[in-house]
Image (cartoon, rainbow, N blue to C red):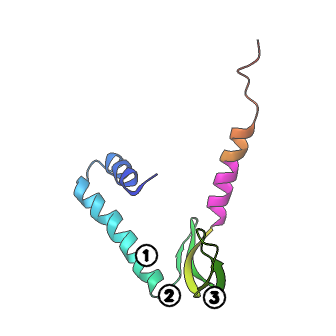
């Protein structure tokens, strides 16, 4: 699902809201979350998960074309940890999808 898909889906489900209002709300929420992460803050959405920053230390990498060694600086990367409710919902769906179907019985 893309950001546009999310906005379209929410706008259809919340028909009393203008499409532009839904679009502004989604974009505003994502912008606020990005700003908080950029500021080193942790974001927790109960039942869904949490976003935080993990530090990747400096390391020696390789240029894929030439094979030359390249020094890469340490950096912070966004990390998402799913919450218990999300994990359970995903696992339930995956388990249901993996069950054999009765369609092949004649």
Looking at the image, which residue sits at the far front?
66
* Left-right relation of 28 to 47: left
In this view of the protein, which residue sits in the foreground, 84 or 5?
Answer: 5
- Magenta span: chief secondary structure: helix
Q: Which label was assigned to residue 58?
A: 3
User: Are the residues tagged 2 and 3 within 8 Å (C-beta)?
Assistant: no
Graded by Cα atoms within 10 Å as few (under 14), some (14 to 19) or many (20 or more), the crowding at tag 2 reads some
Q: CA distance from mark 2 to mark 1?
A: 11 Å
Q: Quadrant of residue 81?
A: bottom right
Front: mark 2 or 3 = 3
Residue 84 magenta-drawn? Answer: yes
Q: Is residue 84 above or below residue 92?
A: below
Residue 56 magenta-drawn? Answer: no
Mark 2 vs mark 1: which is more N-terminal? 1
Magenta range is 83-92
- Helix, strand or loop at label 2? It is loop
Graded by Cα atoms within 10 Å as few (under 14), some (14 to 19) or many (20 or more), the crowding at tag 1 reads some
Residue identifier under label 1: 33
Mark 2 vs mark 3: which is more N-terminal? 2
Q: Quadrant of residue 88?
A: bottom right
- Helix, strand or loop at label 3? It is loop
């Amino acid at each position: 699902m893309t950001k546009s898909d999310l906005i379209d889906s929410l706008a259809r489900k919340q028909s009393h809201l203008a499409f532009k209002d839904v679009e502004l709300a989604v974009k505003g929420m994502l912008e606020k979350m990005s700003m908080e992460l950029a500021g080193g803050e942790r974001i927790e959405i109960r039942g869904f998960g949490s976003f935080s920053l993990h530090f990747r230390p400096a390391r020696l990498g390789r240029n894929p074309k030439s094979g030359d060694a390249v020094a890469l600086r340490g950096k912070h990367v966004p990390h998402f940890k799913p919450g218990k409710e999300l994990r359970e919902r995903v696992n339930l769906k995956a388990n249901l999808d993996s069950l054999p179907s009765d369609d092949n019985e004649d």
